[in-house]
Image (tube, rainbow, N blue to C red):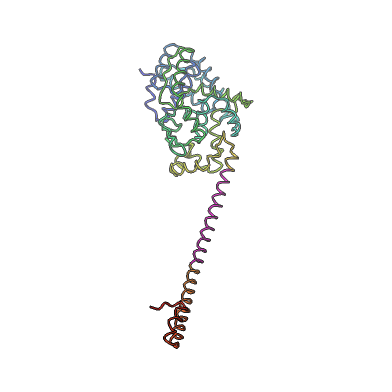
Amino acid sequence: MSSLKYLGNLSPSAHKSYLVALRAYFRAVRGVDTEGMPESELERLLDDYLASKPDFQSDLQTFLAKVQGNAPLTVGVWLSVVKTTLLENDVELPTRFWKGLKRRIKGNRARTVDRIPSNKELKNILLEMPLAGKALFLVQGTAGMRPTESRMLKVADIDLAKDPAQITLRGEYTKNGNPRTTFMSHEAKEFVEKWLPQRQAYAEQSAVKAKKSFGVEKVSDNSLLFPISRNVADEMWANAVKKAGLYEKDPSTGRATLHPHSLRKWFRTRMGAVNVDKTEAITGHDGYLTKAYRRYTVEELAEFYKQNEHALAVFSDESRVTNMKNELDERDKLIGGTLLRMQAKSNDQEETIQRLSSRLTEIEKFALADAVEQVDSILERAKKLPKAERRKFLEDNGLAVD
């Protein structure tokens, strides 16, 4: 009998949530890298686990201790999934044990006080990372993605030829199963362009390290934009935060206040200050997809992103970028005004030329009339002279005589 056969009776979203919970369970109690593990492989892992007849209560207590940093509601759901999975495979633990386990989940919401980094702080963190980290977290942050979404991206999902560079998030990547389109900043694009030639070599080196350190054959997915596991990404982030001198722990939970998910909040804060609806549409925040995402076209969201991308500037001085943008806008206005004045002046000059031309025509008419009058006068005078003198008189007054 298939140990996960019961998942076939669930809705697609519930099915996905159950797999997430089981991956978290085995990551905690078996130390296995289950990030993105296919269902078939997860099922084999579960079969082996059940066949080993472990101390389920001890494992569940270990699991709870390791996931307590997550939101209490999430922990409660994960425990329920594990309980259901065990029951479906004829493993029934005392009700009293389950109640005692759930009582140890404190609070009803996330208790860690997260801190959103400033652009300067984010820059200092990224400077402490290798190229892989810079590209990964800059794409994640400037696209407003969840950490899992960024690590599931495939090379084919990005279009660097568009402005801004476009990212297509498939339904299987997103938390709610809804596909959406987002974008990355020009800074992120530059790091991705540097990262792409090194991506395959990085994946191969990771596979070699996994085999050498853990004796595990790691099959690298050549299609992934970032072939980086969750554990490696989290460690990369934590080390960089510490090196940047920004590491802090929440006193009540012991969790770091700056973590990869902070980047999504950073994006929503920076872009949301301009337009909340469009920002939530880009991030695919629950409750907004049906209301906002369908209200805007991809072109409208791209234009919004492009106009306000300066708010996401990390390696550029945002104030300088903003000032430059304002200066360019002001320059455009000045140039526009100058062109209008030049056009008006040109129109005035054209009118003046037309008036002068008209006046010149009138002068020419008067001059011609005057000349005719002078010729008539000379001819009249010539008639009164003797014929012998008439020829010389006409020549002296500029009139040719044939």
- In the picture, the quarter occupied by the N terminus is top left
**Can residue 320 be seen by looking at this rendering?**
yes
Task: Give the overall secondary structure of the magenta segment.
Answer: helix
Residue 302 in magenta stretch: no
**Residues rendered magenta in the picture:** 324-353
**Can residue 294 be seen by looking at this rendering?**
no
Front-lying residue, 44 or 107: 44
Which residue appears at 55% of the width and 25% of the height? 129
- In the picture, the quarter occupied by the C terminus is bottom left
Query: Where in the figure is residue 252, as x and y percent of width and height?
Result: 63, 26
Query: Where in the figure is residue 186, as x and y percent of width and height?
Result: 50, 36
Q: Quadrant of residue 160?
A: top left
Residue sitting at the far front: 388
Residue sitting at the far left: 1
Query: Where in the figure is residue 27, as x and y percent of width and height?
Result: 48, 19
Left or right, 124 with reference to 228? right
Front-lying residue, 258 or 222: 222
